[in-house]
Amino acid sequence: MSELTEGRNAVIEAYRAGRNVEKLFVLQGCTDGPVRTILREARKKDTLVDFVDKKRLDQMSPTGTHQGVIAQVTDFTYSTVEDILSNASGKGEDPFIFLLDDIEDPHNLGAIIRTANLCGAHGVIITKRHSASVTAVVERASAGAVNYTPVAKVGNLSRTIDELKDMGIWFVCADMDGDVMYNCSLKGPIGLVIGNEGNGVSRLVREKCDFTASIPMKGDIDSLNASVAAGVLAYEIVRQRMGA
C-alpha cells in the first residue's frame, strides 16, 4: 500500500527520514533550489521521476497545495506506546508525551506533531476512533515531522493513561477552568493531554489527569485553536524542564 505526500518540505523530510519513495511527480520546468534538492535525493535512491503539468498535479493533490512536488510513498507506519517510552529512555530523558483526545482536524494534528518534534517530546498518542489519522494533509501540516516523531494509536486513552501512571508518568490536561499554567509544576515524566477542537478534553479523560492547566487569556475571546494551545502549554513544560 502507498500514499501521497506533497509539499517540498514534507517530501524532502520523507527522503531524509528514510521513507520509501516509490515515485516522484514534479511540475515541468520547476528547477528552483528545493526542487533540485529533492531531485538529487531521488537520484540517490533511484526513484522514478515523472515530470507532469500543473493540471495533473492539481488532480492528484489531496490538498491543492502541492508546491509542484508530490511523492508516492509507502504507507505511514504507526509506532507503539512502548516505542515512545523507548525513545525517551534512549535519550536518557524523562518521558514527555502528547496525548490527543479525539483531535479531528488533520491540520491541527499535523501542527501538533510538528510542535511535539520541535519541543523535544518523545511521541504523540492519538485515538483509533474519532481522530484524524496520519495522511498526506497531516504530513504536510507537520512539515515532515511525522517522519521523526513516533505516533501511536490506542483504543482507549483513559486506559493508556492508567498504564502510564503505573510507570510514574504524571498527566496535565488543557482546561479553561484549570490552574494558570505558570502555577503548575510541569517537571519530570509528563503527559500533556489536548482535547477535541469543539468539546475539549472529555470528562473521563480529564478525571484521569493529575491536574489541569489553563492559559492566561487577555483578549476578547476565550479560547485558542487546539494546536496553538498545545504549543503554548508544551513550551511552558520545556521552560520548566530546562530549569528556567
Image (cartoon, grey):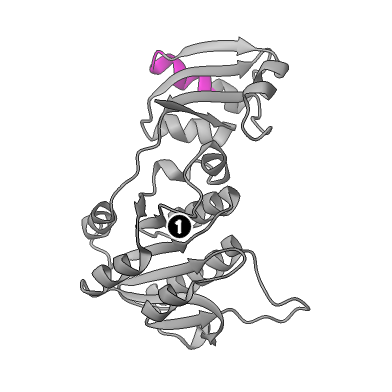
Number of marks in the rendered image: 1
Residue at figure coordinates x 57%, y 17% from the top left: 25
Is residue 40 placed above or below 199 in the rendered structure? Answer: above
Give percent across and percent down for residue 69.
60, 24
Q: x%, y% of residue 126?
A: 42, 56
Residue 25 in the figure: left or right of residue 190: right
Residue at image x 44%, y 73%? 237
Tag 1: residue type?
Answer: Ala
Position of 190 with respect to 47 (left or right) is: left
In the depicted structure, whether residue 114 falls above or below residue 175: above
In the shown orientation, is residue 173 left or right of residue 196? Answer: left
Q: Nearer the viewer, residue 187 or 73?
A: 73
Please say if 40 is above or below 172: above
Q: Quadrant of the N terminus?
A: top left
> Which quadrant holds residue 164?
bottom left
Callout 1 crowding tier (Cα within 10 Å): few <14, some 14–19, many ≥20: many
Residue pointed to by mark 1: 116
Q: Which residue is drawn at the image coordinates 51% and 84% (left, top)?
A: 182
Image: magenta residue range? 37-46
Q: Residue 45: in sight, yes or no?
A: yes
